[in-house]
Amino acid sequence: MGKKEVSQTKSVKSSIVEWIKVFGLAIILAFVITLFIKPTLVRGDSMLPTLHENDYLIINKIGYKVGEPKNGDVIVFKSDLEQNDGTNKDLVKRIIGIEGDRIIIKDGKVYVNDKLLNETYLSQGMDTKGDIDLVVPQGKLFVLGDNREVSLDSRYEQVGLVDISDVEGKVLIRLYPFNDISLIK
């Protein structure tokens, strides 16, 4: 073998090693990213006007493992509701009450700890149906959809209070549609 052939063989081996490194790094990076974030797709109109059908969201999966949920956070959580394929639905709702909060819904208004909730994220004229007076127990959350007229949420026994352990994460970003990319507050 001549010097030229040896040099070409080393070059090919070097290229293969570099490709293996790049591919390995990409797999490790993808794994790490999936530990921290999760994509999800909005189904239904229960979060209008904040979120729309087929909005593609990125959620922070570790936020509540190191911190506490807060009123106003938009979250994704596991529910007992079934989809057409028999799997359980993930729901997207807004936290209205955390453990220890007193929630009152009366005359179309929501009160948290005896203060009227200023819900600027609701469509104008939107009332909250129901007659509720409860204190959120430890380890639970009271959640509502922003489109109160169609939202199946903590007001109804099919959803009820949400176990904090069922929360998959806090919604961070609307990634799609591209003309509506935004942080979710």
Image: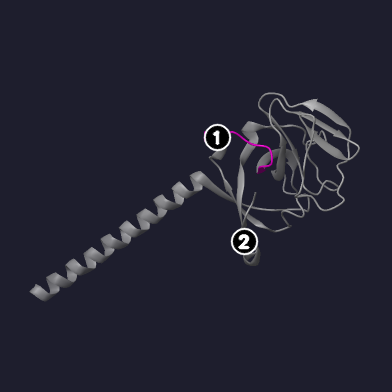
Nearer-the-camera pick, 88 or 98: 98
Query: What residue sits 41% from the left and 53% below the top?
Result: 27
Residue 181 disc label:
2
- Return the disc, 2 or 1, that comes first in the chain's sequence: 1
Q: Is residue 159 above or below residue 172?
A: above
Q: Position of residue 157 (x, y in %)?
A: 82, 33
Is residue 6 magenta-colored? no
Q: Position of residue 179 (x, y in %)?
A: 64, 67
Q: Amino acid at mark 2?
A: Ile
Quadrant of res 5: bottom left
Q: Position of residue 132 (x, y in %)?
A: 85, 31
Q: Of helix, strand and loop, which one carries label 1?
A: loop
Which residue lies under the disc numbered 1? 67
Q: Main secondary structure of the magenta part?
A: loop
Q: Which residues are magenta?
A: 65-74
Query: What residue sits 73% from the left and 28% below the top?
Result: 101
Q: Of helix, strand and loop, which one carries label 2?
A: loop
Q: Amino acid at mark 1?
A: Gly
15 left or right of 150? left
Q: Is residue 7 visible?
A: yes
Query: What residue sits 67% from the left and 24% below the top?
Result: 138
